[in-house]
Amino acid sequence: MDTTLTDTTLTKKDFENGGTLERALRARGVPVAAVVKHRDGTAAADFFAPGWNEPVDPATVWADRILQTLGDVRIISTNDWVNTWSDPPYIMAALVLFDAAPPAPPVDVVAPCMALMIRPCVAIVPFIPFNG
């Protein structure tokens, strides 16, 4: 089976949980180690080398890559874990906390529903009179 990424458009499904976010980031060239999605809609992306013995880029660099990859997300915080006991010290892990809201639907999809005041959870069924 060919797993080559041919479409780089993110969908709502890519934002469902940490696993799908992780796969979406990796497929788009961001070598994230793990992504955990929290119930409040935020996600934590971890970056570290296997064995924690090689340096990684600072969390601000990874935050920029996430912004470029996922588009309109809000970066909440960035944290670096520095190995201070080695000479020279290096960043052994980085964490980016971001708001992982799915992309908004296109305007041409939202506008007709708003004009008709259709709620997504309400089904439109024909009225069938009861003769009972």
Image (spheres, rainbow, N blue to C red):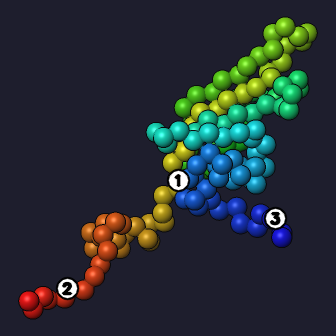
Q: Earlier in the sequence, mark 2 or mark 1?
A: 1
Gap in Å between the C-alphas at discs 1 and 3?
23 Å
Q: Is residue 107 left or right of residue 78?
A: left
- Name the spot of residue 114 as percent of width and height, x first: 31, 67
Q: Which of marks 2 and 3 is nearer the N terminus?
A: 3
> Tag 1, which secondary structure?
loop
Question: Which label number is shown at residue 127?
Answer: 2
Q: Residues within 10 Å of mark 1 (few under 14, many from 20)?
A: some
- Name the spot of residue 32 as percent of width and height, x first: 75, 40
Q: How crowded is mark 2: few (under 14 residues within 10 Å), some or many (20 or more)?
A: few
Residue 36 placement: quadrant? top right
Q: Is residue 69 left or right of residue 107?
A: right
Q: Which of 33 and 75 is in front in this view?
A: 33
Nearer the observer, disc 2 or disc 3? 2
The amino acid type found where label 1 is placed reads Pro
Q: In the displayed orientation, state which residue is furthest to the bottom.
A: 131
> Tag 3, which secondary structure?
loop
Question: Which label number is shown at residue 102?
Answer: 1
Question: Which label number is shown at residue 4?
Answer: 3
Quadrant in which the N terminus is drawn: bottom right
The amino acid type found where label 2 is placed reads Phe
Quadrant in which the C terminus is drawn: bottom left
Judge whether 9 appears above or below 31 on screen: below
Judge whether 62 appears above or below 16 on screen: above
The amino acid type found where label 3 is placed reads Thr
**Looking at the image, do the residues carrying marks 1 and 3 touch, with CB atoms under 8 Å apart?**
no
